Every structure is written in C-alpha cells, then in structure tokens.
C-alpha cells in the first residue's frame, strides 16, 4: 500500500486543478536509479494504467506505481512540506536504510 498524507492530498488537488486535469488523472510514482544515495523518486501526473501497475487510493488520491518501484515503496507515505524551509513533496519510506541530506534519494 502507498499512503497519502493530508498535506500531500491538498497539494495534489491544487496542482491538478491548476493544470486543468480531470478525474481520470492520477499520481504516478516511480523509483529510478540515481541521486546521492543510489535511488531517486520520480512523480508525475498520468492517465494511463499500464500492465503490471499497482494501483492504490488513499485519502481520496489515486496513486499508481510500476511493480518494480512498488518493491521499494511498500508502506511509504507521500507527504508535502511547503513554506520557506519546505522541501515540497517527499516520501516517508520505512524501507530506506539511509537517505541523502536533501531527501531526494535513498538506499535500501
């Protein structure tokens, strides 16, 4: 399961509305190679579910990830932090053994 914090829910809704995206769009989250710690998060809006995608809905937000990424993201919570010292969207990932200082990448 992938979870969505209230802070992320509000920001996702705001961004989707601002971009004029309809209800058939969702948040796609992927884990890619790269970053200081070896693995990075990638997030975008999409409206096409692919074969072997894992589909979740939490807090009214539909989140989709490919099967390989889900192995790294299981039980992760997507959060959002705004303001002067905010870091934008970030992931509270219980599977990460370590993260880099900026929080953009992780290792397992």
Image: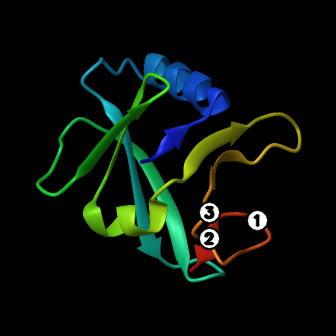
Q: Residue visible at 23% across and 35% down?
A: 47
Q: Position of residue 90 (x, y in %)?
A: 64, 50
Residue 73 or residue 83, whichever sits in front: 73
Front label number (3 vs 2): 3
Residue 25 or residue 76, whichever sits in front: 76
Q: Position of residue 9 (x, y in %)?
A: 56, 27
Q: Position of residue 54 (x, y in %)?
A: 27, 50
According to the picture, the residue beneath numbered tag 3 turns out to be 94
In what quadrant of the picture does the C terminus appear? bottom right
Per the model, the C-alpha gap separating discs 3 and 1 is 17 Å
Q: Helix, strand, or loop for circle 3?
A: loop
- Badge 3 density bin: few <14, some 14–19, many ≥20, Cα 10 Å: some
Q: Helix, strand, or loop for circle 2?
A: strand
According to the picture, the residue beneath numbered tag 2 turns out to be 105
User: Relative to 74, is 90 above or below?
Assistant: above
According to the picture, the residue beneath numbered tag 1 turns out to be 102
Q: Residue visible at 37% across and 61% down?
A: 70
Q: Is residue 11 left or right of residue 61?
A: right
- Badge 1 density bin: few <14, some 14–19, many ≥20, Cα 10 Å: few
């Amino acid at each position: 399961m992938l979870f969505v914090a209230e802070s992320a829910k509000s920001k996702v809704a705001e961004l989707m509305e601002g971009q004029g995206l309809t209800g058939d769009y969702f948040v796609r989250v992927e884990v890619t190679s790269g970053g200081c710690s070896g693995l990075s998060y990638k997030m975008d809006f999409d409206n096409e579910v692919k074969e072997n995608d894992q589909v979740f809905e939490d807090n009214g937000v539909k989140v989709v990830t490919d099967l390989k990424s889900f192995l790294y993201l299981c039980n992760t919570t997507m959060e959002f932090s705004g303001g002067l010292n905010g870091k934008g969207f970030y992931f509270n990932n219980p599977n990460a053994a370590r993260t880099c200082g900026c929080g953009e990448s992780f290792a397992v």
